[in-house]
Image (cartoon, coloured by chain):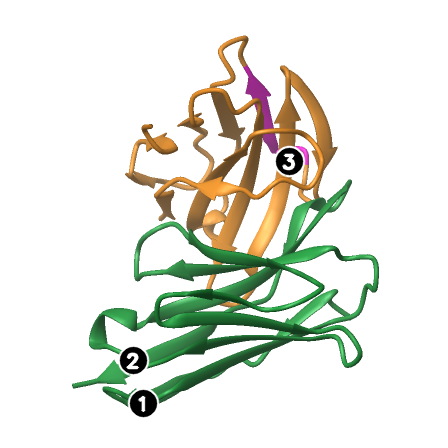
């Protein structure tokens, strides 16, 4: 079975721009979660989607948004980029909604200049 | 206070050493725990999970949970340079704070 895939793998943007990241979960997984990982903050939860609905949202500003499509693929968007948004953005999928183990993609490394 | 706290490290050991990685948790309701391994510039990969009732062994890796002290451990026997990575412990939950709660990770270096 193919793992979680994320595109693009690397991205360089400038302040004020916006960016869209994509995640394809493992086949059959309907839950997709997004995390931001930085050296100082560790893994921080952004949001979770299940069956095209955002179910949970972390403590991030409204500049961070996401969506999920009917095939469970998910995108996250960050508008008006700030320098502090530079991070590794990780997508994780799991089989069922409640407490199942998550499987991570390789991440998208975003650098904001 | 974070629900899962992890020894920050870094930890450096010689090849062949036994490594002990540790976490503590605060929520007695956690039913099982996961260990993820993350190589530099890669996403975390699930290494193993164990239920709160006992231990689990997988090759050179053993995960142990002590419910009385709320302590989670991962032991690596005969450590290899390829084990050099950051190890994250995690517990599942399904709240508006996320599907899982993660420790901040311990960076391990195994020197040849």
Question: Circle 2 marks a residue in which chain?
Answer: B
Q: Within the magenta stretch, is there residue B55?
A: no
Dot 1 crowding, Cα within 10 Å, few <14, some 14–19, many 20+: some
Quick check: marks 1 and 2 in contact, CB under 8 Å?
yes
Chain A is shown in which shade? Answer: orange
Does A37 sit left or right of B97 as displayed? left
Element under label 3? Answer: strand
Do dots 3 and 2 share one subunit?
A: no
Residue at (23% x, 69% y) in the render? B82
Q: Which of the two labelled residues, at mark 1 and mark 2, occupies the earlier sequence position?
A: 1
Q: Which residue is mark 3?
A: A47
Q: Which residue is mark 2?
A: B79
Q: Which mark is residue B17?
A: 1
Question: Circle 3 marks a residue in which chain?
Answer: A
- Residue B62 position within the rendered picture, expressed as x and y whole percent measured from the top left: 47, 71
Rounded to the nearest whole Å, what is the CA distance between mark 1 and mark 2? Answer: 5 Å
Colour green belongs to chain? B
């Amino acid at each position: 079975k193919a793992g979680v895939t994320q595109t693009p793998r690397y991205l360089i943007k400038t302040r004020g721009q916006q960016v869209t990241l994509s995640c394809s979960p493992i086949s059959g997984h309907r839950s997709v979660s997004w995390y931001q990982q930085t050296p100082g903050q560790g893994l921080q939860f952004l949001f979770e989607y299940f069956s095209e609905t955002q179910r949970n949202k972390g403590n991030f500003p409204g500049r961070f948004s996401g969506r999920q499509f009917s095939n469970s693929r998910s995108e996250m968007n960050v508008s008006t980029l700030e320098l502090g948004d530079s991070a590794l953005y990780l997508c994780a999928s799991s089989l069922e909604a409640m407490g199942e183990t998550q499987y991570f993609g390789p991440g998208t490394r975003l650098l904001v200049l | 206070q974070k629900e899962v706290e992890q020894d920050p490290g870094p930890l450096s050991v010689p090849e062949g050493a036994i490594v002990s990685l540790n976490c503590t948790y605060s929520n007695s309701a956690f039913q099982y725990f996961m260990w993820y391994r993350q190589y530099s510039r890669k996403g975390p990969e699930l290494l193993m999970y164990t239920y709160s009732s006992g231990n689990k062994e997988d090759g050179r890796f053993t995960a142990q949970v002590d419910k009385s002290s709320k302590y989670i451990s991962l032991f690596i026997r005969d450590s290899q340079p390829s084990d050099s990575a950051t190890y994250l412990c995690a517990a599942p939950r399904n709240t508006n704070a996320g599907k899982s709660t993660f420790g901040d990770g311990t960076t391990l270096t195994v020197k040849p």
